[in-house]
Image (cartoon, grey):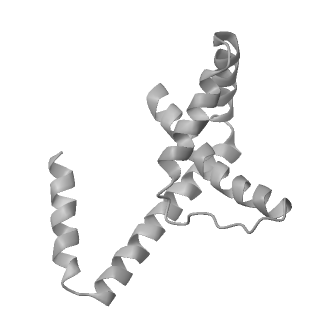
Amino acid sequence: MIEFVRLSVVTLLGGLLVVSSAYAQEERGAKASPVLDGSDINQQLIERQQKIDQLSEAERAKLQAAYTVAFEDPLVKAAIAARAKAIEDYQAALYKSMVASDPAVEALLQKRAELAKQQ
């Protein structure tokens, strides 16, 4: 459960990082060009973790305690549910669009899904 909460926090904060980074660039007058396909999320999460690692153990514990409390907040729970729904909607739209652009891709997507179930 703690690992799930940690991954959820990291993912949620990673998404916020992408959005806030774009707004920060826009405020500085730079053209905001966030990566919309999520391909840079791993790098952002690594950089975020490196910053957290610079905190003292006590500071990290305090931050983790705040996350734990925050995840019990109904607004946070609702946001997590909305995020999960948004991901499902995105995946369904992407699947539909890919198959529409090339119907032969559907068999590959199904094969990939079967391989993922085996792992």
The mark total stands at 0
Find residue 88 and report its horizontal and vertical position in percent.
Answer: 44, 64
Find residue 84 and report its horizontal and vertical position in percent.
Answer: 50, 56
Front position in the image: 24 or 59: 24
**Res 109 → quadrant:** bottom left
- Image quarter in which the N terminus is found: top left
**Residue at point 52%, 33% (across, down):** 5
Vertically, is 108 above or below 96? Answer: above
**Res 92 → quadrant:** bottom left
- Image quarter in which the C terminus is found: top left
Any part of residue 1 in sight:
no
Front position in the image: 79 or 16: 16
**Res 101 → quadrant:** bottom left
Any part of residue 97 in sight:
yes
**Residue at point 71%, 60% (across, down):** 22
Q: Residue furthest top?
A: 58
Horizontal side of residue 21 vs 103, given as left or right: right
**Residue at point 45%, 29% (across, down):** 3
Horizontal side of residue 57 vs 98, given as left or right: right
**Residue at point 26%, 87% (across, down):** 102
Horizontal side of residue 3 vs 60, given as left or right: left
Horizontal side of residue 51 vs 1, given as left or right: right
